[in-house]
Amino acid sequence: MNKFILEGVNLWYGDFQALKGIDMEIPANKITAFIGPSGCGKSTLIKSLNRMNDLIEGCKVSGNILLDGESINGDTDVNALRKRVGMVFQKPNPFPMSVFDNIAYGPRTHGVKSKLALGEIVERSLRDAAIWDEVKDRLKKSALGLSGGQQQRLCIARALSVQPDVLLMDEPTSALDPISTAKIEELVITLKKHYTIVIVTHNMQQATRISNRTGFFLLGELVEFGKTNKLFSLPKDKRTEDYITGRFG
Amino acid sequence: MGRRTLVAWKKVCNREFVAKVIFIVSASAAVLAVGLICVFLLVQGLPAMWDIGIVSFLTGTDWRPTWTPPLFGILPMILGSLYVTVGAVFFGVPVGIFAAVFMARFCPPYLYKVLKPAVNLLAGIPSVVYGYFGMVVLVPFVRGHIGGNGNSILTASILLGMMILPTIITISESAIRAVPEEIYEGAVALGASHERAVFFTVLPAAKSGVFAAVILGIGRAVGETMAVRMVAGNQAVLRMPHEILSGTRTLTANVVIELGYAADEHRQALIATGVVLFVFIMGINIAFSMLKKKDGL
Ligand SMILES: Nc1ncnc2c1ncn2[C@@H]1O[C@H](COP(=O)(O)OP(=O)(O)OP(=O)(O)O)[C@@H](O)[C@H]1O
Ligand SMILES: [Mg+2]
């Protein structure tokens, strides 16, 4: 089962072409990692999957992106799309409100009003993000008082609160210490049971530890894409080999 | 060390010393000015307040400086200032905040190029010009369409509401712009519309800056003299809040109207009025700087 199918996706920032003819099939309930040197287009691609690129002026996309077989281009309802395809950012970005309101924001946005229902959603999301025990006594306190690692798990809980199908994560651990990173990696692995996960990472150990598929990007092109253990043990392309053995990048 | 170097050293030291003195004097000027005003007000105003009796000065409802014995009760003026300020907040704050949100988050660039200078211009218009506008436009409008003789609390509130707009818009706008883009993106990534992300995420994130803007606006409204004097009617008679169509006199107007001819105790009572005003403004500024500290603006 494929969650996303990308067919000949090109993307331009003004005159600059950042993605060149990307063809790709992202399987459901698996973890897909994007790796590649800085500036190769990983963030650009992941942001096209929930159309966050729409916020960037002068950004133009061609080709086709299918989610569960349906195109997300053109006049798709982007708010509904982003509800289905959640996102966790590189830098934890909790809202300056209480822990509870952070998690309740998404459901409230999509029309959940009852206090009881919100309370349940908040607890479930926080449990799923493995942070419930750490925050259950401070739900009414500001989320900004949490540590960086806790904030990132809070942001994961916030993304889970609207029950998405897909979770996009752009370098979610690059701002965190090793212990918080390990916690999040563990969490991501448990989440793949229910979610399709796409993760951008600069850390190749991380990609091998958690992902099922890996795509290697270079200068806006998808050089190689396949099963993670294959790609790291027997890369087909010379450029992939050079990159994963640390000869450039 | 040679004689020449010694001389050169002395020269430098001298120059540095002079520069230091200049800096210190300039830096102290502002503090000194506030200090002098403070001392002057207290020395001149407090004894009068004492003679009249602080309670009867602050809560007395009659201001009859020409009677024998004269009556100096400034409660009507305190309430007058309060009413027009509350009115100004009522008219100015919602409009100002919406304008700031619009300018920071909705306005297309070509419109911004017109709006921003317009707001700046609004801030630079002398208050006597506002007062003139109030006299020839607002007063007849209120008289004709709402009631009363037009010189009223309502008119002054509307005019003051306009006058505090630039303060509120400018400070709120920069507070809204200071909210990190990630906060907005986080909301949008959850499926929130642009409007929802702005009003329920970005604006709340800017709330202490917006509060600061409101407080500064209130300060401006309390202290405004000339424009209010030109449209408020200036009766020194106690008015109750439901009479928004009747005139009122503010603390500031009271001072500026009577100080020219007042003498002796009357004059001192006016300076005491200034003390009350000063305390109000000081309270507002303390509130502002406390908010600023909290927000790290
Ligand atoms: N908003 C933008 N406007 C113009 N060019 C952009 C914009 N965002 C990214 N680019 C360019 O597009 C290319 C791909 O950027 P992208 O952010 O996708 O790279 P990345 O692979 O995520 O890199 P990193 O690993 O450093 O995060 C880069 O050359 C970058 O300069
Ligand atoms: Mg990136």
Image (cartoon, rainbow, N blue to C red):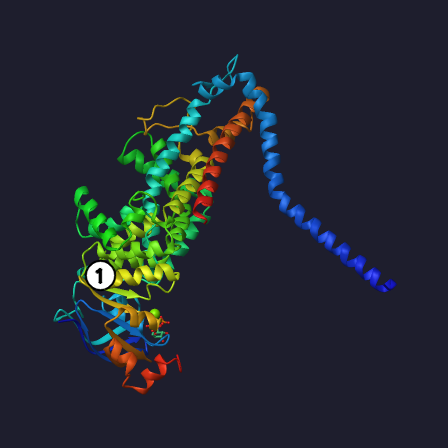
Q: Crowdedness of circle 1 by 10 Å Cα count: few (<14), some, many (20+)?
A: some
Q: Is residue B33 above or below residue B16?
A: above
Q: Residue at x 32, y 78 (%)?
A: A15
Labels in figure, total: 1
Q: Nearer the viewer, residue B163 or A30?
A: A30
- Can the viewer see residue A179? yes
Residue found at the far right of this picture: B3
Residue plotted at (34% across, 23% down) = B240
Image check: B161 left or right of A197? right
**Residue A59 showing in the rendered view:** no
What secondary structure is marked by label 1?
helix
* Badge 1 residue CB within 8 Å of ligand 2: no
Q: Nearer the viewer, residue B39 or A26?
A: A26
- Spot the residue most to the top: B68
| Residue A90 image point, x, y percent | 34, 63
Choose top left, top right, bottom left or bottom right for residue A200: bottom left
User: Eyeballing the image, is A67 above or below B273?
Assistant: below
Three-letter amino acid code at the position of disc 1: Leu
**Which residue does the image show at 69% across and 50% down from the upper left?**
B22
A11 or B148, which lies in front?
A11
Pointer 1: what residue?
A: A191
Q: Position of residue B147 (x, y in %)?
A: 28, 31
